[in-house]
Amino acid sequence: MLKEWEDDGECDLYFFDEAGFSQSSSLPYAWSPIAKPWEVTAYSHSKRLNVLGFLTRKGEFFHHMTTESVTSEIVIEAFDQFAAHKDPDAFAVVVLDNARMHHSKAFQRKIVDWMAHRIHLVYLSPYSPELNLIEILWREIKYRWLPLTAYSSFDKLCDSVKNVCNSYGKNYSITFA
């Protein structure tokens, strides 16, 4: 039903989620030329860049980045920035998971404010991340779009993630059926 509303132009459908990026590489394997193996430093502890994103099937991507732990306050900050960024006349439906921070008292108090900005929240069924399309974006960034060299330093990692996120829709895209 939400997809039909979006297709009919009745709403903008966004998928929201958080993803973390650290030098503890997400790469399960890599190919290299014979006799020229890639060497990547293994980091057991690394700082973390957290990206909170809002993604549409049409290729719109709004994101908020932080090196702080993702708390209710950080999620509220991301939603407030999204509310200020979106077209004030457009009705937005945001699909999100049931993470604890999405049900906190502070978050729940903000829902009425966001409704005033024409933002309506729809929670996914528990344990169904496959229904959240932004999970595909996180997988593409971690496993395909970040170069192996991004993991050489935390600053490079942050720059690479920012580059991919800022270039989404231009240099990087996903086609949703």
Image (cartoon, rainbow, N blue to C red):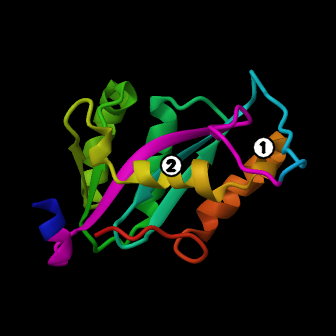
The residue sitting at 50% across, 70% down in the picture is: 173
Secondary structure at badge 2 equals: helix
**x and y percent of residue 50 in the render?**
60, 40
Question: How many marks on residues?
Answer: 2
Local crowd size for mark 1, using a 10 Å CA cut-off: few (<14), some (14–19), many (≥20): many
Q: Which residue is mark 2?
A: 139
Residue type for callout 1: Tyr
Secondary structure at badge 1 equals: helix
Q: Which sits earlier in the primary sequence, circle 2 or circle 1?
A: 2
Residue type for callout 2: Arg
Residue 10: in magenta span: yes
Q: Which residue is situated farthest in the right direction here? A: 35
Residue 28 shown left or right of residue 118 in the figure: right
**x and y percent of residue 102 in the render?**
34, 33
The residue sitting at 35% across, 34% down in the picture is: 107
In the foreground, 82 or 57: 57
Q: Which residue is situated farthest in the top direction here? A: 44
**What is the magenta range?**
5-33
Residue 110 shown left or right of residue 75 in the figure: left
Q: Which residue is mark 1?
A: 151
Residue 2: in magenta span: no
